[in-house]
Amino acid sequence: MDRWVVLASLSAVIAFLAGGLFETNFYDSEVVMLTYFLMALPFISLSDRI
């Protein structure tokens, strides 16, 4: 995958954590599953190169 996928995933997780400073959003299951998906995106590119 391209480098922009890794940077986009990192920025989305940072935005999620920054939003957690102002409200409790980690207990909402839809938000957490989207965050886990965004965290897993950079690792998809690792399986292409092995």
Image (cartoon, helix red, strand yellow):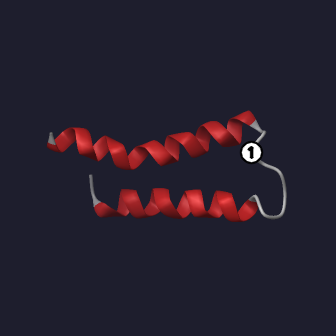
Which residue is most to the right? 23
On the image, numbered disc 1 is attached to which residue?
A: 26
Q: Residue at x 38, y 57 (%)?
A: 5
Q: Can you tell which quarter of the image residue 32 is in?
A: top right
Q: Can you tell which quarter of the image residue 27 is in?
A: top right
Identify the element where label 1 is drawn.
loop
Position in image of residue 25 (x %, y %)? 78, 48
Position in image of residue 3 (x %, y %)? 30, 62
Q: Is residue 3 above or below residue 40?
A: below
**Tag 1: amino acid:** Phe
Which residue is most to the left? 50
Residue 50 lies left or right of residue 20; in this view the side is left
Q: Is residue 43 above or below residue 20?
A: above
- The image quadrant where one finds the C terminus is top left
Q: Can you tell which quarter of the image residue 35 is in?
A: top right
Residue 30 lies left or right of residue 46; in this view the side is right
Q: Residue at x 74, y 45 (%)?
A: 26
Q: Residue at x 19, y 41 (%)?
A: 48
Please tell me how many numbered marks the rendered image carries. 1
Please rate how many residues cluster around mark 1, counting C-alpha atoms within 10 Å: few if below 14, some from 14 to 19, many from 20. some
